[in-house]
């Protein structure tokens, strides 16, 4: 569903050289994977016989038993679209190959031999096996039980009219200088399935885990590895049964090692997202010339593989811009350092004597001021080089005003307070606007008045106006054109609202108690431009999220829409899963409609936005990541929402 396919890695209990027992265990593992509607399940290397048979592989009895075992296992898959990858020794033209058999619905689809044979320290595979390279170019055909079966290393399996495709490499192939999976990915495989048999040594699991993660990231693919378990021979080594699934550089699932029972792990992988990632990464397609298709075989799957029935095993965070808890401090500091470095460079280049910034007591201006403070420290300049200006207007509340004043005092910056109500009233008179009409004009006059003050103060003091607007507001066009939309350097321009809160919280944790308390209260204040008068009790009346919908939702929409080009119905499906129990489906749909309409109609503001640093993978800079006509129509997307 929506491009998601469930991938599985199984580590069964096995007995060395006892084929009948092993086939029974493999069949049971396959049955469990198929019941969970896995598209593919990978078993360990040489699992039909066991990896550690040694010179027993030379024995015809074992090889015949393995081939008969493969046939019995294949029969057991009849009627299921789930693909299985199992390993066995396979004899071809007087050479023995360490082979993976790809099986679906009672058929052996292909046999893939191992390319890179380890022959060092505890490994001596070249003693028994021949590399798949010895087959020469192209894919051969072998006969097994009267069936003509492709046999070769360059086979890409794919499903017609779907993004699902995969290739197979075996264990050491991944550890080589140029893994076969690199070529398979460039040939179109969006998943790599690896039956493996890695011994366990201190620290080796961490290295294996990183190999799988990195290869999935380099190849923009999913990667599934199943490694032989503890029931292999322990004559000189121990096998741990390490099972891993990675998704485009991200660990998706990992099984427990050293289990004495069979293990089975799953991950629901978005193959449409992998397709979109390859489409946008020019370096991936540029690399295709390094590995021409040549005699590679693209093999269409005879049966439809099951799509993931749900997103039970999917990585679908509700707040995709936030760092994981384990790396939160590191990531926050990295983001802040990028912002600081960008602003410091701009200060040096322009020879700015001051940093001029409007302070409202809200989230965005708070983070921008904190970055200004960091930039001054980085350049060994005093905090007094920052000119913070608070400009109370018709909607300013005591809470935001007092927080702004307190923060400026604690940071040691120069603070000026310039009320704007009277000059706005004069401007209303100049343009013939009745201030009782609380229209867009009423609001935008205030925003433009504030920007004019900041720009003129910058001119007067030799300063640089630091912009405060964030990525969420830029996406939604929630700013006044040539008002808060404009600055001389916009430090928050690629940071969404959900991440702004996280960064302020991180800085609060490392601040003095008084500053931490102020930052915490700012984080807890409702988001508002404060352009309409407060309520009767003096609290904020104009709450942005009551107008637009929650930023949690809009940031979620932005992430999937920009990064992976997800269609509206898919974004809705993902959001309903991520926010189940938090927001109702109808509400999510209405908010997505707002996002789509505003995103298309407000591009003209993005087309002339000021410079600012990119900190993550998503930016809407018209000079960098996002090039879109200001008059592009969003009708196709809006219709998709209305028909959902």
Image: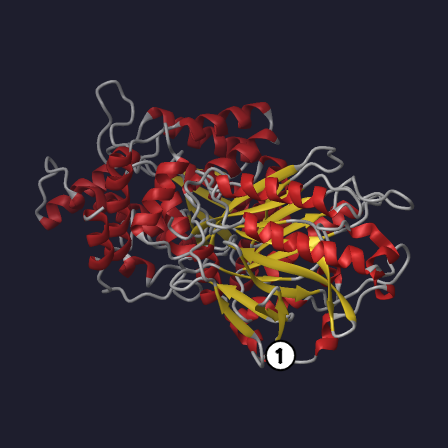
Can I make out residue 379 in this image?
no
Considering depth in this image, is 588 or 532 the residue closer to the camera?
A: 588
In the rendered image, residue 161, in percent from the top left (x then y), is placed at 38, 63
Question: Residue, x 56% and y 76% (percent of image)?
Answer: 288
Q: How is the image coloured?
A: secondary structure
The answer to which quarter of the image holds residue 516 is top right
Question: Residue, x 65% and y 51% (percent of image)?
Answer: 225
Q: Would you say 205 lies left or right of 469 here?
A: right
Q: Would you say 520 lies left or right of 95 here?
A: left
Q: Residue at label 1?
A: 138
Question: Residue, x 79% and y 48% (percent of image)?
Answer: 17
The answer to which quarter of the image holds residue 327 is top right
Q: Which residue lies furthest to the top in this view?
A: 537
In the rendered image, residue 236, in percent from the top left (x then y), is placed at 91, 46
- Looking at the image, is 148 positioned above or below residue 398? below
Q: Would you say 257 lies left or right of 419 here?
A: right
Considering depth in this image, is 80 or 117 the residue closer to the camera?
A: 80
């Amino acid at each position: 569903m929506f491009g998601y396919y469930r991938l599985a890695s199984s580590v069964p209990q096995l007995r060395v050289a006892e084929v009948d027992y092993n086939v029974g265990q493999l069949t049971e593992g396959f049955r469990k994977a198929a019941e969970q509607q896995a598209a593919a399940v990978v078993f360990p290397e040489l699992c039909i016989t066991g990896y550690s048979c040694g010179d027993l592989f030379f024995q015809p009895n074992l090889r015949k038993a393995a081939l008969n075992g493969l046939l019995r296992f294949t029969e057991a898959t009849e009627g299921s679209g789930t693909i299985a990858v199992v390993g066995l020794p396979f004899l071809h033209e007087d050479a023995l190959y360490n082979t993976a058999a790809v099986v679906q619905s009672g058929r052996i689809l292909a046999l893939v031999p191992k390319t890179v044979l380890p022959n060092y320290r505890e490994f001596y595979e070249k003693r028994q096996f021949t590399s798949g390279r010895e087959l020469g170019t192209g894919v051969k055909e072998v006969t097994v039980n009267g069936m003509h079966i492709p046999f070769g290393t360059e086979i890409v399996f794919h499903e017609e009219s779907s993004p699902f495709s995969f290739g197979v490499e075996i264990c050491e192939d991944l550890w080589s200088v140029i893994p076969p999976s690199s070529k398979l990915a460039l040939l179109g495989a969006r998943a790599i399935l690896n039956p493996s048999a890695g011994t366990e040594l201190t620290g080796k699991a961490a290295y294996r885990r990183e190999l799988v993660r990195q290869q999935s990231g380099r190849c923009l693919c999913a990667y599934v590895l199943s490694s032989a378990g503890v029931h292999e021979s322990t004559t000189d080594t121990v096998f741990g049964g390490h099972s891993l699934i990675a998704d485009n550089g991200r660990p998706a699932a990992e099984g427990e090692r050293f289990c004495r029972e069979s293990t089975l792990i799953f991950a629901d992988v978005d193959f449409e997202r992998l397709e979109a990632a390859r489409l946008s990464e020019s370096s991936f397609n540029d690399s295709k010339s390094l590995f021409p298709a040549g005699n590679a075989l693209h093999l269409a799957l005879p049966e439809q593989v099951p799509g993931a029935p749900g997103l039970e095993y999917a990585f679908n965070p509700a707040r995709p811009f936030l760092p994981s808890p384990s790396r939160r401090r590191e990531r926050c500091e990295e983001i802040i350092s990028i912002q600081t470095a960008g602003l410091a460079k701009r200060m040096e280049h322009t020879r700015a004597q001051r940093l001029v910034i409007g302070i409202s007591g809200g989230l965005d201006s708070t983070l921008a001021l904190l970055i200004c403070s960091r930039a001054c420290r980085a350049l060994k300049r005093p905090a007094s080089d920052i000119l913070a200006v608070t400009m109370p207007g018709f909607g300013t509340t005591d809470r935001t005003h007092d927080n702004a004043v307190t923060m400026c005092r604690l940071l040691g910056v120069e603070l000026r307070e310039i009320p704007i109500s009277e000059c706005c009233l004069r401007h209303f008179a100049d343009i013939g606007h009745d201030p009782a009409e609380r229209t867009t004009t009423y609001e935008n006059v205030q925003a433009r008045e504030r920007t004019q003050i900041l720009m003129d103060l910058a001119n007067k003091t030799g300063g640089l106006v630091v912009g405060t607007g964030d990525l969420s507001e830029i996406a939604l066009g929630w700013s006044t054109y040539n008002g808060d939309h404009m600055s001389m350097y916009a430090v928050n321009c690629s940071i969404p609202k959900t991440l702004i809160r996280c960064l302020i919280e991180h800085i609060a944790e490392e601040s003095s108690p008084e500053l931490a308390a102020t930052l915490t209260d700012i984080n807890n204040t409702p988001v508002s431009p404060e352009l309409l008068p407060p309520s009767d009790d003096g609290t904020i009346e104009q709450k942005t999220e009551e107008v637009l919908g929650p930023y949690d939702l809009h940031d979620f929409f932005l992430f999937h829409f920009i990064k992976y080009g997800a269609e509206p119905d898919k974004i809705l499906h993902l959001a309903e899963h991520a926010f189940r129990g938090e927001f109702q489906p109808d509400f999510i749909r209405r908010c997505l409609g707002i996002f789509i309409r505003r995103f298309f109609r407000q591009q003209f503001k993005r087309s002339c936005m000021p410079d600012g640093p990119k900190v993550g993978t998503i930016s809407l800079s018209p000079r960098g990541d996002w090039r879109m006509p200001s008059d592009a129509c969003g009708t196709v997307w809006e219709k998709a929402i209305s028909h959902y």
